[in-house]
Amino acid sequence: MKFVNYLEKISGVGIYPMISLVLFTVLFTFVVIYALKVSRETISEMERLPLDGE
């Protein structure tokens, strides 16, 4: 039995791709907004983190 056959037996299975698309879009939007609004000092601090010996 193929995997598609299992999915056909679940009622309302069509909503799951829509939910995951909405969640991805919201998360992606927040990450892009954060990347555009973060200050230069914070970016410089994050750049130096792997090199800090502390």
Image (cartoon, rainbow, N blue to C red):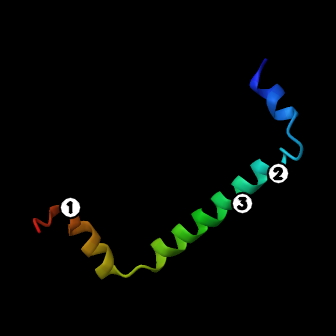
Residue 50's tag is 1
Image-based side of 5 in relation to 39, left or right = right
The percent coordinates of residue 40 (x first, y second) are 33, 79
Q: Earlier in the sequence, mark 3 or mark 2?
A: 2
In the image, what residue type sits under mark 2?
A: Ile
Say if mark 1 contacts mark 3, CB within 8 Å: no
Image quarter in which the C terminus is found? bottom left
Label 1 to label 3: alpha-carbon separation: 34 Å
The percent coordinates of residue 52 (x first, y second) are 14, 67
Neighbor class of circle 2 (other Cα within 10 Å; few <14, some 14-19, many 20+) is few
Image-based side of 19 in relation to 41, left or right = right
Label 3 to label 2: alpha-carbon separation: 11 Å
In the image, what residue type sits under mark 1?
A: Pro
Asked if 43 appears above or below 8 in the picture, the reply is below
For the point 80% across and 28% down, the residue is 4
Label 1 to label 2: alpha-carbon separation: 42 Å
Neighbor class of circle 3 (other Cα within 10 Å; few <14, some 14-19, many 20+) is few
Of 30 and 37, the residue lying toward us: 30
Q: Earlier in the sequence, mark 1 or mark 2?
A: 2
- Tell me the quarter of the picture where residue 38 sits: bottom left
Q: Indicate the secondary structure of the residue bearing disc 1.
A: helix
Residue for badge 3:
22
Q: Indicate the secondary structure of the residue bearing disc 2.
A: helix
Q: Earlier in the sequence, mark 1 or mark 3?
A: 3
Looking at the rendered image, the disc whose residue lies closer to the viewer, 1 or 2, is 2
- Tell me the quarter of the picture where residue 51 sits: bottom left
Q: Indicate the secondary structure of the residue bearing disc 3.
A: helix
Residue lying furthest left: 53
Looking at the rendered image, the disc whose residue lies closer to the viewer, 3 or 2, is 2
Image-based side of 9 in relation to 48, left or right = right
Residue 15's tag is 2
For the point 71% across and 54% down, the residue is 21
